Image: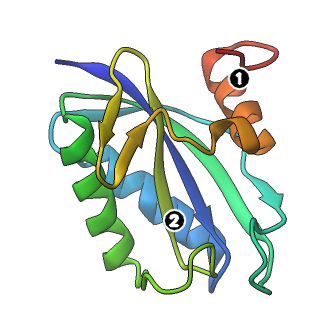
Amino acid sequence: MRDIAYIALGSNLGDREAYLDSARSAIAALPGTRLLRASSVEETAPVGDVPQGPYLNQMVAIETELAPRELLDRLQEIERSAGRVRGVRWGPRTLDLDIVMFDRQTANEPGLLVPHPELPNRDFWRRELAELRGRGEYSE
């Protein structure tokens, strides 16, 4: 099933802009997927209690044939290729890719909840979704 997915991109280590650029290119190159739009890039404070520098964040809208689990697996491959090491929760990272939501699909399985459960807590995600969807403010 073709659907629109919204992917959050974040980076707070190294050349943050380059990590976001390469992530957009890698996402656009996924099979059965095309990049539709990208939100503005914004710098945000980190989430959680781990001391670290600010993030650059952006969201992309993609049209994809990939199911939520397959998309997540592919996004985690992109993270690993960017040097992402999973360690401390909410710790610093070269690249963080999250499936925020799909237009028509949901997922509720181990390690994958769509829409993302943190969506109500992340103002910058809601702003980016609103920008991508052409609305003044995101609401469910």
Tell me the residue that label 1 is attached to.
130
SS at badge 2: strand
Query: Mark 2, residues whose alpha carbon is within 10 Å: few (<14), some, or many (≥20)?
Result: many
Number of labels in the image equals 2
Q: Which mark is residue 44?
A: none
In 3D space, how far apart are the residues under numbered discs 2 and 1 (Cα atoms)?
20 Å
Residue 71, by quadrant, is top left
Residue 104, by quadrant, is top left
In the rendered view, would you say 1 is above or below 115? above
Tell me the residue that label 2 is attached to.
96
Query: Mark 1, residues whose alpha carbon is within 10 Å: few (<14), some, or many (≥20)?
Result: some
Q: Residue at x 16, y 34 (%)?
A: 32
The kind of residue tagged 1 is: Ala
* Residue 79 % position (x, y): 38, 70
In the rendered view, would you say 132 is above or below 28? above
The kind of residue tagged 2 is: Asp
* Residue 35 % position (x, y): 39, 35
Is 70 left or right of 112, judged from the image as shown?
A: left
User: Looking at the rendering, in which quadrant would you find the C terminus?
Assistant: top right
Q: Residue at x 32, y 33 (%)?
A: 107
* Residue 25 % position (x, y): 38, 54
* Residue 72 % position (x, y): 30, 51
